[in-house]
Image: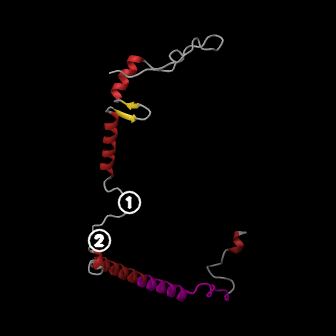
Amino acid sequence: MSAEHAPTGGQFDDPETHHEESDVNIRGIFGFAIALTIVALVMHVIVWLLFRYYAAREAAPVATEYPLGVERQNDMPPMPRLQTNPRQDLRDMRAGEDAILSTYGWADRNAGAVRIPIAEAMKLTLERGLPARDQAAPGGAPTSSGDASSGRYVGEIRR
């Protein structure tokens, strides 16, 4: 079967059969490529000129254009402002928290609640122990009643 389709001696049997000349327009392809290159070059030049224009505009002094802006140059913007040094702000905040956690003071004066340093609170907890509930009786009721025996810690801090 493949012998039927093989050309004989490199020549076709029909001398009037040739390749199709209307498939590809070489002139159109080269014309499009040249036009595309020209448009790309023009766009590059336009963008380069825009960058030069904006760079020159940024380099121009602003004070001469806006004389009233010179007096307000050092004015601070309204609150809230952005952080200018966040690391130092964090250090200051932690130092303030450490000062609160390591000193005596009132937590709520009206309620009579005070704060004590963490080290002192840990010592008091070791001395007095943690509050615990009483063991329940077999019937499910507590063995005793009252504030001190019901597991609630009632006491005061002595110095």
Secondary structure at badge 1 equals loop
From the image, which quarter does the N terminus lie in?
bottom right
What amino acid is at disc 1? Met
Q: Which residue is mark 1?
A: 79
Residue 35 horizontal/vertical position (percent): 48, 86
> In percent of the image, x 39 and y 80: which residue is there?
47
Assign the C terminus to one quadrant of the image. Answer: top left
Q: Position of residue 44 (x, y in %)?
A: 40, 80
Q: Is residue 55 left or right of residue 14?
A: left
- The residue wearing badge 2 is 72
Q: Is residue 81 left or right of residue 1?
A: left
Q: Note whether 82 is above or below 27 in the view shown.
A: above
Specify whether residue 71 is painted magenta. Answer: no
Relative to 86, residue 9 above or below: below
> Is disc 1 surrounded by few (<14), some (14 to 19) or many (20+) residues within 10 Å?
few
Graded by Cα atoms within 10 Å as few (under 14), some (14 to 19) or many (20 or more), the crowding at tag 2 reads few
Determine the residue positioned at 61% across, 79% down. Answer: 10
In the image, is residue 124 above or below residue 112? Answer: above
Give, as a three-letter code, the residue at label 2.
Arg
Q: Which residues are magenta?
A: 15-42
Q: Secondary structure at mark 2?
A: loop
Check the image and report above or below for 95 versus 150. Answer: below
User: Camera-side residue: 24 or 109?
Assistant: 109
Viewer-closest of 111 and 152: 111
User: Which label sits on residue 103?
Assistant: none
